Image (cartoon, rainbow, N blue to C red):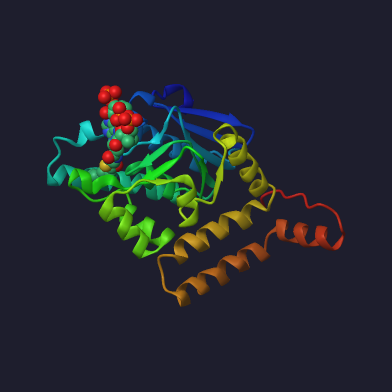
């Protein structure tokens, strides 16, 4: 039902995979209020919908997302800027925290809020045409949809500072070399590559993927000792699952495992 009431995003199902296509190509899919609201609605639905096991986000046309909508922000002063950042950060946190794998299939411009959207996903696969960057300094502001925090965590502080201070755009191959993307593929096979990787992930025990994600995400925010405590607790949960028994029985029985997400 959510999919029927969207104007700026196309939401489709391919089996257990939800494919979200940012779809305001005339503005290179820039994030206006309507698009942010639609993304929020979709992710609320994805949190609840048990039949959907993984998500791909991509863009229509030559943009993935060319950032926050500049025409909308033009009139903002300090307080509105804060509210805007607050709202987008909450949304991107929600995307990052979804306990299902989310892949960004970056087809084109991923600038500003678009780069930040891709970084709230678990994995980034880029088409050869993808371009990444944080150009906010050109506009007199700083990245504030999570970019000052997520970019250095992905590429290190030195490269993150260079990219944020200079606003330099980075093409797909360079993005891979600095660790911003996982894989670069031909434009025409982008979606197939993203689906193939997601299907490989979905063949594994779903709870193992879910708790790996929680352990990695929360672990990045705490010190090593707390992260290892969390890892131990989450490992204990997985050892108690039926899928753990199935996985280990199948290995020892020399047969493929059949997981049931329990
Ligand atoms: C609103 C945008 C837009 C954006 C592109 N468009 N990006 N509109 N907000 N972020 C619109 C253009 O105005 C234009 O509309 C149409 O999309 C096509 O763009 P062109 O510039 O004509 O295309 P091209 O020459 O190919 O250049 C592509 C581009 C350029 C290099 C991506 O569009 C660009 O630099 N865009 C801005 C990127 C940016 O600075 N993003 C960061 C925003 S700040 P018309 O009507 O003329 O056809 C951000 C975080 C801010 O994301 C957080 C602060 C709170």
Q: Which of 29 and 258 is in front in this view?
A: 29
Q: Locate residue 53 relative to residue 7 in the image: left or right.
A: right
Q: Which residue is drawn at 44% across and 65% down?
A: 220
Q: Residue at x 39, y 50 (%)?
A: 93
Q: Nearer the viewer, residue 149 or 156?
A: 156
Q: Which of 74 and 96 is in front in this view?
A: 74
Q: Residue at x 40, y 65 (%)?
A: 221
Rendered view: 156 above or below 184: below
Query: x, y (%) of residue 121?
Result: 47, 48
Query: x, y (%) of residue 84?
Result: 24, 42
Query: x, y (%) of residue 148?
Result: 31, 56
> Where ligand 1 lies, by image quadrant?
top left
Q: Locate residue 95 relative to residue 158 in the image: left or right.
A: right
Rendered view: 253 above or below 61: below
Question: For the image shown, how many numbered marks are present on the structure?
Answer: 0
Rendered view: 178 above or below 139: below
Q: Locate residue 89 relative to residue 173 in the image: left or right.
A: left
Query: x, y (%) of residue 202?
Result: 65, 46
């Amino acid at each position: 039902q959510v999919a029927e009431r969207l104007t700026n995003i196309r939401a489709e199902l391919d089996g257990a995979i939800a494919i979200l296509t940012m779809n305001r190509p005339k503005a290179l899919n820039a994030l206006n209020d309507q698009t942010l609201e639609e993304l929020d609605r979709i992710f609320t639905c994805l949190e609840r919908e048990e039949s959907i096991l993984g998500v791909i986000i991509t863009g229509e046309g030559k943009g993935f997302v060319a950032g926050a909508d500049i025409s909308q922000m033009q009139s903002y002063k300090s307080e509105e800027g804060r509210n805007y950042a607050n709202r987008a950060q909450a949304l991107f946190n929600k995307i990052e925290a979804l306990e299902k794998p989310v892949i960004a299939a970056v087809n084109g411009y991923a600038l500003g809020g678009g780069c930040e959207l891709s970084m709230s996903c678990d994995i980034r696969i880029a088409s050869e045409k993808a371009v990444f960057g944080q150009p906010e300094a050109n506009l007199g502001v700083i990245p504030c949809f999570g970019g000052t925090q997520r970019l250095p965590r992905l590429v290190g502080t030195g490269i993150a500072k260079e990219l944020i201070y200079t606003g330099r755009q980075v093409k797909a191959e360079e993005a891979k070399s600095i660790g911003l993307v996982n894989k670069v593929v031909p434009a025409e096979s982008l979606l197939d590559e993203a689906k193939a990787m997601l299907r490989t992930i979905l063949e594994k025990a779903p709870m193992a993927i879910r708790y790996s994600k929680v352990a990695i995400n929360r672990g990045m925010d705490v010190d090593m000792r707390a992260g290892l405590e969390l890892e131990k607790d989450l490992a204990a949960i997985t050892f108690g699952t039926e899928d753990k028994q199935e996985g280990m029985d199948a290995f020892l029985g020399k047969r493929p495992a059949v997981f049931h997400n329990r």
